[in-house]
Amino acid sequence: MQDALSFNGFTVEVAETGTNGYAAAKENGFDLIILDLMLPGMQGFDVLTKLRERGVHTPVMILTARGHEADRVRGLDLGADDYVIKPFSVKELVARVHAHLRRRSTEAGTTMRVALGNAEFDFQARRAFQEGRPVPVLPKELDLAQFLLENPGRVVTRDELLLKVWEYPVSGLQTRTVDNYVMKLRQKVEPDPARPKYILTVRGKGYRLEHT
């Protein structure tokens, strides 16, 4: 993978253990982290959990032979941005890396700072604020907020969010990931998350953003 990515013009740093990978990821400003799950020293899920807890929100692409749906859901719920199951082709890997970096590049070139409820989102800097103070935010929380803000007043289904925000095949189990991220987003946006006034649940369908 290192050779393939380097050949395609990427600068690649490799860590052979989970412990070393975590140490590098928490200190260096990488554009993308490709994370295996079966690692010596520290398992991939533990690396991802510790990075997110530390406030490292670099996009993470999980690469693994563990293709069970429960593992995919767990990875997404922990804050992964993509989940690629082995075996895969080099062409697919390179295409996915390009897609993630292209998305970040597009966002960086777009000036968009939007207030929503108690929060303000800076989609250019990939940051969120409450009362002017930065608050931790996961990449997919930002993507979810941006998609909802681009579709105000319209009911969006969980399946649509899973496809448009996560770019992931639809599964009834995986829609729980959407619900979990909506709950996290409400914690930042809503004055009373238990009684939302901005991100509303439409029973049996999905969610609707009331942007006032």
Image: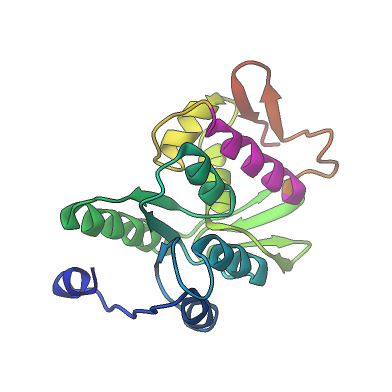
| Rendered view: 192 above or below 200 | below
Residue 61, percent across and down? 40, 58
Residue toward you, 100 or 177? 177
From this view, report whether residue 46 is shown above or below residue 151.
below
User: Residue 46, position in %: x, y?
Assistant: 58, 64
* First to last magenta residue range: 173-188
Q: Quadrant of the C terminus?
A: top right
Of residue 14 and residue 163, the one placed in the foreground of this image is 14
Residue 84 lies within the magenta run: no
The residue at 25%/56% (across/down) is 93
Quadrant of res 148: top right
Q: Residue at x 40, y 39 (%)?
A: 168
Q: Position of residue 210 (x, y in %)?
A: 68, 31
Name the colour scheme.
Answer: rainbow
- Residue 66 is left or right of residue 129, and the answer is left
**Residue 191, position as x, y percentages in the image:** 84, 44
Secondary structure that dominates the magenta span: helix
Q: Residue at x 29, y 54 (%)?
A: 96
